[in-house]
Amino acid sequence: MQPKRCYDTKHRTELMAYFSSHRGECLTAREIIAGSGLEIGEATVYRLLSKLTAEGKLKRFIEDNSTGARYQFSEEACAAHYHLRCLDCGDTICVDMPEFAGLGDKLSEDFGFSMDNTKTVIYGVCRGCRHRRIKHAAD
């Protein structure tokens, strides 16, 4: 049995170019459809997001049941570190910290748990949003 071939269709190429030009941003399918300027049908966008995620070209994040999935351009380097995700603005920050280097090994040793770095996300509030919250509270 031969592996499935991926064809670079016009829509696939356009969607990948869109994500490439929006590195670091996490977008919902609806945001892509409404704001991308791409002439791609809704069903095609959803189908391509699913395929590109399965191929590892995009990362998929589930925040909660109300907003659905968000997608982000997947950098090869992202497999080697962790991600911080802002609950306010949705930005994702890549984190390379020596303190985290042995976390996967420690979890494996202590709990027999095999962690997937590519899907490990720590949720919280980024510096900019934290400052906005403090300013808003002071007003």
Image (cartoon, grey):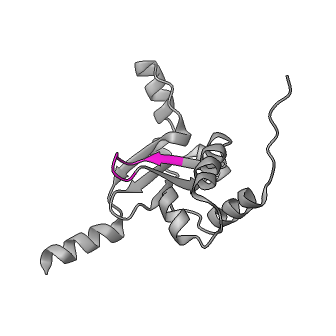
Give residue 42's quadrant in the image.
bottom right
Question: The C terminus is located in which quarter?
Answer: bottom left
Residue 74 can be seen, yes or no: no
Residue at x 39%, y 47% (from the top left corner): 122
On the rendered structure, is 53 left or right of 25? right
Residue at x 47%, y 47% (from the top left corner): 61
On the rendered structure, is 2 left or right of 28? right
- Please, which residue is most extreme toward the left here? 138
Give residue 38's quadrant in the image.
bottom right
Q: Report x, y in % for residue 7.
A: 81, 48
Between residues 4 and 45, which one lies in front from this camera angle? 45
Q: Report x, y in % for residue 90.
A: 41, 60
Q: Is residue 33 magenta?
A: no
What segment carries the magenta color? 60-67
On the rendered structure, is 83 left or right of 79? left
Q: Is residue 64 magenta?
A: yes
Q: Report x, y in % for residue 88.
A: 33, 62
Residue at x 56%, y 55% (from the top left corner): 72
Between residues 96 and 68, which one lies in front from this camera angle? 68
What number of labels is visible? 0
Above or below, 102 relative to 62: above
